[in-house]
């Protein structure tokens, strides 16, 4: 089960990175179109009119997808911002209770958001909602990575909650500990 969960977290991180790379490629293609148009205009006096339609809209869709798909991966690798000022001063037992409270609260909030994001996707699919723009896109395709990312985050939070309830450390604290050991060496 651990191997499957880690594979899911890693796959969501890879998808998030692919979305960011796609944004870069879209912007690069749009810049190349502008350069070619500029060269053509300077040579012939007329632009070729090369343009990638709805590039800003697609970049926004990909940005949202990368943000949500990257949530679980970054949490598992200790990349989320955590304020540990309070927990540093607590005893190990109190720190564990705070950790459980935070994981439980985070899981409940993420599960609530996941539920409503999935309902949003289903509504968009059922009513055939389309985006506004030069290129019309089915909104459920655009909303699906958001819902998927939230569901995977919920699973990751529940995973860490079960691990902490079992007496072990959460995944993100293990990353912190390994970084502390590297700094000490």
Image (tube, grey):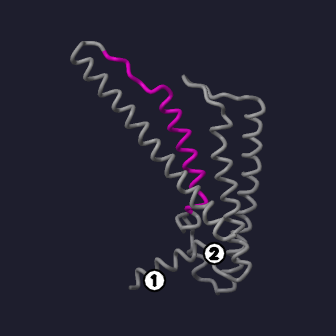
Indicate yes or no whether the magenta region holds residue 115. Answer: no
Residue 181 is marked as: 1
Q: Quadrant of the C terminus?
A: bottom left
Expressed as whole percent of the image width and height from the top left, the position of residue 167 reads 70, 83
Q: Which residues lie in the magenta part?
A: 47-74
> Neighbour class for label 2 at 10 Å: few (<14), some, many (≥20)?
many
- Looking at the image, how many numbered discs can be counted on the residues? 2
Secondary element type, mark 2: loop
Q: Quarter holding the N terminus? A: bottom right
Instruction: Say if the magenta span includes residue 59.
Output: yes
Q: Is residue 62 above or below residue 109?
A: above
Residue 135 sits in quarter: top right
At horizontal 55% and vertical 63% (from top left) the residue drawn is 80
**Which residue lies at the image location 66% right of the left edge and 59% below the top edge?**
153
Point 50% across, 28% down: residue: 54
Q: CA distance from mark 1 to mark 2?
A: 17 Å
Q: Residue furthest left?
A: 43
Q: Are marks 1 and 2 in contact (CB under 8 Å)?
A: no
Where does the image place residue 168, in percent across and percent down from the top left?
66, 81
178 to the left or right of 130: left
Q: Position of residue 35 (x, y in %)?
A: 29, 28
165 in relation to 142, above or below: below
Numbered badge on residue 170? 2
């Amino acid at each position: 089960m651990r191997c499957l969960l880690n594979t899911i977290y890693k796959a969501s991180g890879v998808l998030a990175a692919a979305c960011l790379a796609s944004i870069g490629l879209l912007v690069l293609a749009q810049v190349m179109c502008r350069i070619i148009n500029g060269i053509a205009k300077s040579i012939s006096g007329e632009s070729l009119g090369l343009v990638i339609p709805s590039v800003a809209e697609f970049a926004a869709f990909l940005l949202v997808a990368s943000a949500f798909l990257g949530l679980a991966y970054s949490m598992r690798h200790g990349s989320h911002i955590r304020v540990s000022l309070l927990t540093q001063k607590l005893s190990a037992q109190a720190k564990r209770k705070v950790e459980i409270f935070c994981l439980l609260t985070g899981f409940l909030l993420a599960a609530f958001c996941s539920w409503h994001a999935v309902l949003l996707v289903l509504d968009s699919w059922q009513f055939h909602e389309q985006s506004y723009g030069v290129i019309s896109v089915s909104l459920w395709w655009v909303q699906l990575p958001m819902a998927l990312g939230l569901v995977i985050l919920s699973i990751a939070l529940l995973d860490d909650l079960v691990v902490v309830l079992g007496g072990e450390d959460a995944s993100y604290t293990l990353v912190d500990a390994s970084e502390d050991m590297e700094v000490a060496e």
